[in-house]
Each structure stands twice: as structure tokens, then as C-alpha cells.
Image (cartoon, rainbow, N blue to C red):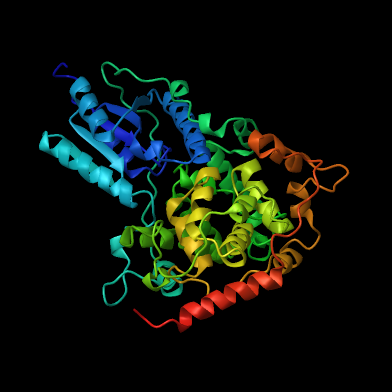
Amino acid sequence: MSEFDPAAVILWFRRDLRLADHPALAAAVALGRPVIPLFIHDETVTALGAAAKWRLGEGVAALARALEGIGSRLVLRRGWAHEVLEALVAETGAAAVYWTRSYDRDGIARDREVKADLRGAGIEARSFPGAVLFEPWTVATGQGRPYNVYTPFWKALRDRDPGPLEQAPARLRPPAAWPASEDLRDWAMGRAMDRGVAVVGRFASVGEAAARARLDLFLGERLARYSEDRDHPARSATSGLSEHLAWGEISVRTVWHAAMAARDAGARGAEKFLSELGWREFAWHLMYHAPEIDRRNWRADWDGFPWRGDSDDAERWRRGMTGEPIVDAAMREMFVTGRMHNRARMVAASYLTKHLLTDWRIGLRWFADCLTDWDPAANAMGWQWVAGSGPDAAPYFRVFNPATQAEKFDAGGAYRRAYIAEGQAEPPETALAFFDAAPRHWGLSPGQVYPERLIPLAEGRSRALAAYARRNAAPAT
């Protein structure tokens, strides 16, 4: 390396697949040195569920194209993160590695190891904010403790300024010579999806440009009726940004600033939408302070609750064959589109954990395998909220009645018809697509008879309430 070619900065992309409002990228560019963008198929990627891994691969491909547009490229490597980084530093003579901070247990453990190894070798290693609005340790109660209840958390958050946005660079300075890169196709990130890729791929929205277009569409056409329509799964009422936020194709700060501007301009629905962004923030702060929230009951007094383990009933739930149309529609929507409407998620989760008394972790693991917008913090909090074992949880006696929920939020049956083919003379494409995406060994076909209910709804509710009553009556140990 010549004296006129300063040491490069390796920019390690993870769940931050964007160029705009990327603090780590902005800091690297500000140095005026060559930047080597890198994505590592590391231990955290290997652990992803099938749909999430496929969707991540699509996002990485989109990022690579965006980088080419500003005179750069994305280097791809596979292996343990610390080994890959040490090798790339040795190959390139890079003097620094920058990345966006993680807040989950596994990500934090990986990053600490990487940072220690790099700094021990004399390499600058820095992590930057960018995945959440505010660092979790900066939002606390008057006693200096993290919030466990959403309402006071939101009051503390709603008028705080997360800071100005970082502009996307027009160009990245390349290194004198590019290091070798693996081929994304060789990673076969959609292998576990099998034939589902052809179905789910039709519904994916991928990349930073698509994220920005979705935000603009939402603000211009949907925000005004967001509060009234957001709970109706057949209506095009939500932002559709969940998959983009999950993979960092747009920053939550970008969305926040846009929604705040709309609120300040008097837009209806803006305050409610901001509060939903607040729930995402709350989930990540909880995961940071309680890193086992996706594995253990947040409320320790639930550890003795007699959850059912995996069973034939849980398998019927996974396959969208419970006989409860709105539950089955929700499960099939996830298989067809890779996503599930939030109201439908609550109903499906309540049915599994309360009517079927099944451990919430069984549902969480299935969602982790099937959702393209898999967000470990939001989904862990959501499952524990519905089950009753989590922070700010639904009270134990809140048992969502699928029939009542369907009558209230899908009165005309449009959502159920969209995903349940059985009994329809001319089922829509979305309903038929479920049978194209479902594993062949399930042996499902659109001409089959729709199943009877697994359990009468009143009986399921009574059974759940009795179990909760026994738990509440049990002496403390």
C-alpha cells in the first residue's frame, strides 16, 4: 500500500442494509479513507429461520446493487465473524472496522468478542447507533431503572428528538485493490424455503428504494385513516414497513421524523402510528435489559404454569387447519406472504396459548421460521404479551375469541376468503397459493374438506381461565 493510499475502513453491514441515515457509514465516509463494505454470513445468520434467511439474502443483494451505484461493492464472506474480520484486516491492511450496534444477547456477545480481538491487534473497532431511536440505557425511570410498562415509557419517549438524519453518500472511496468476495448464490439462503420461495417472493418488497416508496405511499394515502383501519386485516391500512425495518433497509429514525412532520402538520393518524413505532422501541429496550425474553418467561412466577408442549393440536395450528377460519387465515397468510397482519397475530397467538394452552415458545419458534419480517424483540414481547407472562402483558382473563374478533375486524369475511380456499367455487390466487407453498408431505389440497374445530371456543376459554385460576391460587414457592 502506497503512502498515498491510506488504510481502509471495513464497514460491516448486518441488519442495516441501507445507505441513508447510517451513522457508521457516515463516520467511515467522514474519514476520507477507502471504505470496504462487508457482509458476513456468520453464526447469527446461520441461526435464522428459513423465511428470514431468504429475505435477508434478498436484502443483501439489493444493498450490493446500491453500493455499485455509488462506485463501490459489497464483499461477501462466510464464517465466524471474528475470524473473517481478522483475515480481511490482514488481507487489506485496514486500520478500522465500523458497524451498527446490536441489542440482542447473541449479537452483543459476538460484538464484544470481535471488538476485544480487533483492539487487541491494534485495530480501531467502533460500534454506532442506528437500529433504534434511542440507546436503551438512555431511557429510564426517575429511579434510573428501565421501564417495564409501555405507557410511561411512551410518555418519556414521544417528544424526545432522536437527532438529525445522516445523508446517503454520493460515492464511496474504493480501496486500491478489492479483496476477494464469495458469490451470494453459493450461499443458497433460500434453500430451506424450498418451493415456498416462488410464492413468498411475489409478495416481498426489498431494498432501500422500495422502503422509501412504501413510506411515501403510507403517508400520502393511508395515514389519515390509520387509527380507524389498522386493525382490519383485509384493508390496505398499515405502512408495510415491517420487513424493511427488520433488515434495516430504512432507519426507524427516518420513519419517525417523517411521521413527526406529518403530526406537526395536523395529519390524522400520525400520533397513533408514532406510538406503534414506540412499541417497537419498547421491545428492543426490553430485550437489551432482559436478554432472555425470547427464551424464558419474563415473569418468573409463570415458570410453573402447566403449558402443553408440542402436540398434534399445535401441528394443526402450524398448518392453518384448526377449524377456526380467522386463525387459519392468519397462519396461511404468513405462509403465502411471509408476513401476518398484527391483529391476526394476536388472535392466532392467543388461540395457541389460551384455547390450546400451548407454550408460547412453540409459537415463537414457528413465527421465527416463517416470517420474512422476523424481529426477535417485537415477536418475543408480542408472544409474552398475549400469553400473559411478559411485561405489560394482557391480563390472564383476556382470551381473544376468534369468532368475535372475526365479526368485529373482518365482518364481510374478505380476509378469511383471501386465504382459505376450501368451500369456495373460485378461490382467489392468495388462497390457492397456500397449497403451492405448503410442504408436500403435509398432503394438503384446495379441494379438501375444511376441518372441524379443534375445540369449542367456550370450552377452550373455560379451560384457559381454570388453568390461570389454579396458577393464581397456588401458594408461592
Pinpoint residue 284: horizontal percent, then vertical percent. 39, 57
Q: In the image shown, does 369 or 58 lie closer to the viewer?
A: 369
Q: Pinpoint residue 427: horizontal percent, then vertical percent.
A: 82, 43
Up/down of 276 relative to 81, above or below: below
Q: Is residue 465 left or right of residue 389?
A: right
User: Vertically, is 280 above or below 213?
Assistant: below
In the displayed orientation, state which residue is furthest to the right: 425
Q: Does the rendering let one see residue 236?
A: no
The quadrant in which residue 440 appears is top right
* Residue shown at the point (37%, 42%) measured from the top left: 22
Above or below 325: residue 94:
above
Question: Is residue 458 shown left or right of residue 314?
Answer: right
- The residue at 11%/37% (across/down) is 120
Residue 276 in sight:
yes
Q: Is residue 291 above or below residue 429?
A: below
Q: Nearer the viewer, residue 198 or 180?
A: 198
Quadrant in which the C terminus appears: bottom left
Percent x, y for residue 222? 66, 55
Count of numbered labels shown in the rendering: 0
